[in-house]
Image (cartoon, helix red, strand yellow):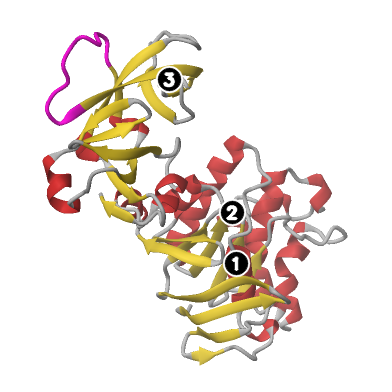
Amino acid sequence: MANVRLEEITRQFDNVTAIENISFEVPNGEFWVLVGPSGCGKSTILRTIAGLETATNGNLYIGENLVNDVPARQRDVAMVFQNYALYPHMSVAENLSFGLRMRKADAKTIAERVERVARSLNISHLLDRKPKQLSGGQQQRVALGRAIAREPQVFLLDEPLSNLDAQLRDDTRAELKQLHQRLGITTLYVTHDQIEAMTLGDRIVVLEGGKIQQIGEPQTIYARPANRMVATFLGNPPMNILPATYTNADFHVSGQFLPCPAVLKTSLHPTQEQVFDLGIRPEHLSIVSSPAEKPQVEMAQLTLEVNVVEPLGRETLIRGNLPDSEVLLNVQAAANWRGRPGDRITVQLNLDELFVFDAATGEVLYS
């Protein structure tokens, strides 16, 4: 096992910069997740660490060794791909032992590791089968087992669960977490699924446009995002964004008004007609049963026109927009809430949970 350190790594393809000035260090034994929308550069980072891509600029260290010019086969990393990449003519046992056989390990070592890995992943009963005889989840476990059997310094996972159905993805995600807790191998995991990122990672690296937006522990990033992109990417449903203009000590939001809390006035010193993006998560909105009721001091109210009602079992998700505008809101309601598209409802906002972003740059001004 080893730490992984990237120092101002840039990768260009002709005139396209895939990643730019990427710097971070994964401590020995930690599980880090690279997350972001498609095309943000997360897989390029993983492939550069593996040696499948060559950095245009910057330095890459595995342990204390600079590996910029070290070929992939000598970096002592194991990578699991999205499409499993199993050898179809080999049995499960032969797939598991392939890396060891290529390194000319002795037969006893190979047999012991294959048996141990198969038992750990609950695939001992599948050792004589070929990949085509396995389910998607079983194939994924074999691909993971092949990487684990090598006992590498670093484990690289490139969206390994994206081809699985929802239930199997949840089960395999839990298995992955337990596996890392047992083995303690330094791991980098790429995904665009923010639930995987939040549940698996010791730390998350959020990327967009080939650049790092924020690095931190999952709950810290969720509670204190660095900018609007991070705030809206992590969280399901995502954070609501309300374009607002500061007018006469209030926020003007598409014909409706929200009081500006005193703490915001003190912190931001907003000026007349200054524009902001206000952010609030769906769990900090609630439906008001009697709109005539005055909100508490730290609360505010908006009128919402319901577009879609999504019963989710333990709760109901309401999607709608502010009347006569394109501003959309997601609201989490009780499971027994009854309403239909076209209804107008009053929602209450907890102003203590309000975020304020720079409308132009997206940088967080207050959280």
The image position of residue 245, as x and y in percent, is 31, 39
Looking at the rendered structure, the kind of residue marked 1 is: Ile
**Residue 256 vs residue 307, the one in the foreground:** 256
Looking at the rendered structure, the kind of residue marked 3 is: Pro
Which residue is labeled 3 in the image? Answer: 323
What residue appears at the point 45 percent right and 52 percent down from the top-left corner?
A: 229
Which residue is labeled 1 in the image? Answer: 148
What residue appears at the point 45 percent right and 31 percent down from the top-left corner?
A: 327
Looking at the rendered structure, the kind of residue marked 2 is: Leu
- Distance between the alpha carbons at the discs numbered 3 and 1: 55 Å
Which residue is labeled 2 in the image? Answer: 121
Image position of 118 with respect to 275: above or below: below
Image position of 34 with respect to 254: above or below: below
Q: Secondary structure at mark 1?
A: helix
User: Label for residue 17?
Assistant: none
Image position of 309 with respect to 111: above or below: above
- Say whether disc 1 or disc 2 marks the residue closer to the N-terminus: 2
- Say whether disc 3 or disc 1 marks the residue closer to the N-terminus: 1
The image position of residue 72, as x and y in percent, is 68, 81
Q: State which region is magenta.
A: 288-299
Query: Looking at the image, can residue 288 be seen?
Result: yes
What residue appears at the point 58 percent right and 88 percent down from the top-left corner?
A: 67
